[in-house]
Amino acid sequence: MSESKVVVITGASSGIGEATAKLLAKDGAKLVLGARRENRLKDIADSIEKLGGEATYQSTDVTDDDQVESLAKLAIDKFGRIDVWLNNAGIMPQSVLSEKKINDWNNMIDINIKGTLYGIGAAIPYMDKQKSGHIINVSSVAGHTAHQGSAVYSATKFAVRAISESLRQEMVDAKNNVRVTVISPGAINTELLSSVTDPEVKANMEKFYESFGIPVDRVALTIKEAIDMPADAAWNEVIIRPTNQLG
Ligand code: NDP
């Protein structure tokens, strides 16, 4: 069903973005990959093309609206449409508030929240014209609950859910058939912990992920299922968590 859909993915250079790109490409989707590490994007696009798939890529920092707009334009120039836009780029440098890690706070707000908004802003005009489309935003289990140390990360992921629900209602009002899905993963083994700057928090998280983390293809499969739903139905929100993860 993802066959021949044009899918734009931010944060496509590793983890959930990379796994989703490869899975959808196998199914015939045309991929447009964005992230900052261009060499990684090139390798992923090459490996997709070697398997007979179609992919293009562009270095994209989601904190820069011009670069996000340019990624959308690449999709239109190369493939003529945007069927799915996956706002996946994100970082998780958790720490307690008293550490006052202002750079981490700002980066999470810029990447996790503003990056998602810029993606929506870039994709919607095209989807509106097409009278179809699908925005998929990656939140987190941490977007449903907060704990010591997760304040800003959780706040950004709660924000993704709030933005998504407002967007869903606005799309209904616009009668443009644009679906909105929020994917909220639990502990998934990716490169995400490399964004944690506090050594103690990082060590604790590494232990947690070693005990509970599950392979990334579980999330890719979830995203594919959401895309494959018939167009008159939308999975608005999915939590995909390791069976043995408590919170
Ligand atoms: P990874 O670290 O493997 O992937 C994160 C991706 O985001 C990378 O491709 C990175 O690429 C990209 N990225 C980071 N900053 C920017 C930026 N400024 N502009 C563009 N791209 C950027 O981790 P995951 O795959 O796990 O993370 C994907 C999403 O899943 C994130 O939103 C994360 O919060 C969410 N998530 C992950 C969970 C997990 O346990 N793994 C749990 C819950 C949610 P590059 O550095 O090349 O720019």
Image (tube, helix red, strand yellow):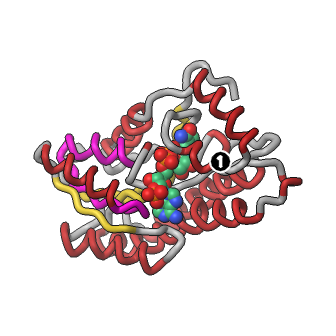
- Residue pictured at 31% horizontal, 48% vertical: 21
Verify whether residue 36 appears in magenta: yes
Judging depth in this view, the residue of 121 and 242 nearest the camera is 242
Kindly give the residue lying farthest to the front in the view shown: 199
- Mark 1 lies within 8 Å of ligand 1 (Cβ measured): no
Q: Which residue is mark 1?
A: 196
Q: Position of residue 66 (x, y in %)?
A: 44, 80
Q: Position of residue 115 (x, y in %)?
A: 53, 66
Q: Which part of the image, by quadrant, shows the N terminus?
A: top left
Q: Tag 1, which secondary structure?
A: loop
Kindly give the residue lying farthest to the bottom in the view shown: 66
Judging depth in this view, the residue of 173 and 196 nearest the camera is 196
Kindly give the residue lying farthest to the right in the view shown: 98
- Residue pictured at 40% horizontal, 42% vertical: 223
Say if 218 sits above or below 128 in the image: above
Magenta region, residue range: 17-38
Judging depth in this view, the residue of 64 and 202 nearest the camera is 202
Q: Which part of the image, by quadrant, shows the C terminus?
A: top right
Q: Position of residue 88 (x, y in %)?
A: 47, 54
Residue 88 in view in this figure = no
Residue 44 in view in this figure = yes
Viewed as shown, does residue 96 lie left or right of 10?
right
Q: Label 1 is placed on what type of residue?
A: Val
Say if 51 sits above or below 175 in the image: above
Say if 132 sits above or below 152 in the image: below
